[in-house]
Image (cartoon, helix red, strand yellow):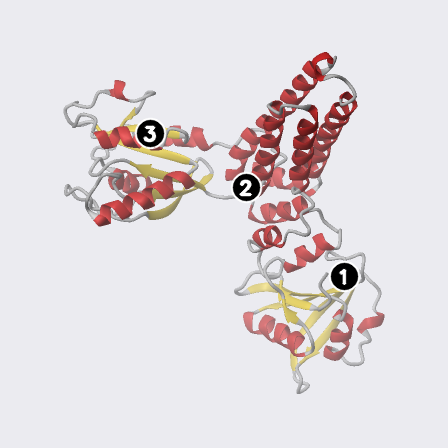
Amino acid sequence: MPNDTIVAPATPAGVGGLAIVRLSGPETFTILNRLLPGQRISQQPSHTVRLVWLKDEKGKPVDQVMLTVFRQPRSYTGEDMAEITCHGGPLIREKITDLCRKNGCRLAEPGEFTRRAVLNGKLTLSQAEAILALVNATSPLAHRTAIAAYQGETTRWIAELAESLRDLCSEIEYLLGFDEQECPNLRIINCQTRAIIARINRIIKKAERNRFLFEPARVAIVGRTNVGKSSLFNLLLEEERAITSPIPGTTRDRIEATLTSGGVKVNLIDTCGYDPESKDPLTRQGTIQTRKAIEQADLLLIVFDNSQPAHKQDQAILAETKKKPKIYIINKSDLARRFDPAFLPEQGLWLSCKTGAGLSRLRRTIQRQLKPAHLPSPLISRRQIEVLNECRANLLTSLTCPDLETRAAEIKFGLDSLSKIDSPLTAEDILNRIFARFCIGK
């Protein structure tokens, strides 16, 4: 557990009416006594506010501030804590932060206040993630989802699922006393396991959609050379960001830009023409980058050329993208048709990047693919979805176990996986991953 005292501005950089500098740790009030001699801050009652003049080490006034005191354990972090509310000029905020550091504080790391709240049992880890989601919410649904998680909906849902797994494990352990060939309830156990898996599947599906409420969806434009990927990139952005040319292979690297589609923020990625058999070293390197973009994408826009028959590179692209969510696009629809749409495993959208025909339909299709679920999901982060996927994998493995002992072990592994949603307090890498996304003062 940390035993030093930290300080950081808790309001954004820039000019504003007010700014807040936050302190937390065992020396909070001792440090404030040094900053405000004669004020006896160490005796100020918890949850009270005092109007004081703060002066520098030479006795010159810095600002008239409101000092709010929070005594442990009734504070955000669970430690002794204080907030200094000053006028919102950057110079004032920096001077107050520097004075605190000179008198014994350390500058806080990103998310360290909330991290201390988790370590001190004031928040669960999922509530901490909900705070970040709440800060970043840009729509009413995102706000409702984050509030539900902050109020403990994620924790309650995980507790209910864990209880179901514990009951299942208890039943299996009870059956260990029977001959497995004569086991009366094995079919029931299988049904219960599959029911839990189905329940997890529904939550993951909803969470995958709602994840785009809080982080951009990665949409990659993929295709062989000269099918119009960069033209589509520019068309969707409504600006000339990528260089286009009739010369094949103009784009040799990934180009990224951000747009908003149907209320969802999108990271749009233009990729190099996909050609794994190319002898050109730049094209081969570009193909490696394209593969990475395909792997990381939440949605693929796979582009084909209407003016030419399908190529072997097109077949290779179909194979590479088989397991990813995708929209097939047949570009250059203004030219004579030579591409057979039956080549595609499902119906494609006809588009002309030259005339814009079909663009509105493509935008609607992208929005439909990325549209969040109507009901809030108890899971709000990619990390939580990964944990639930891990739990599901354990349950699926349990169905194929050769005996009840290993089946019970797999279900217990699933329980251990599930505990990571709220209790990975010994896993430093998980905590670092979560709190690195917070601002310094949160």
**Residue 216 percent across, percent down from the top left:** 46, 43
Secondary structure type for disc 3: helix
**Residue 65 percent across, percent down from the top left:** 69, 70
- Tell me which amino acid carries mark 3: Ala
Specify the quadrant that holds the C terminus. Answer: bottom right
- Tell me which amino acid carries mark 2: Arg
Residue highlighted by disc 3: 319
Q: For the residues marked 3 and 1, what is the alpha-carbon distance in whole angstroms?
A: 56 Å
Q: Earlier in the sequence, mark 2 or mark 3?
A: 3
Label 1 crowd (10 A; few <14 / some 14-19 / many >=20): many
Circles 3 and 1: CB distance less than 8 Å?
Answer: no
Give 172 or 282, whichever is nearer the viewer: 172
Q: Earlier in the sequence, mark 1 or mark 2?
A: 1
Secondary structure type for disc 1: loop
- The answer to which image quadrant residue 346 occupies is top left
Residue highlighted by disc 2: 382
Residue 201 lies, with reference to residue 115, above or below; the image says above
Residue drawn at point x = 59 percent, y = 23 percent: 400
| 340 with respect to 19 (left or right) | left
Label 2 crowd (10 A; few <14 / some 14-19 / many >=20): some
Give 246 or 186, whichever is nearer the viewer: 186
Specify the quadrant that holds the N terminus. Answer: bottom right
- Tell me which amino acid carries mark 1: Glu
Residue highlighted by disc 1: 79
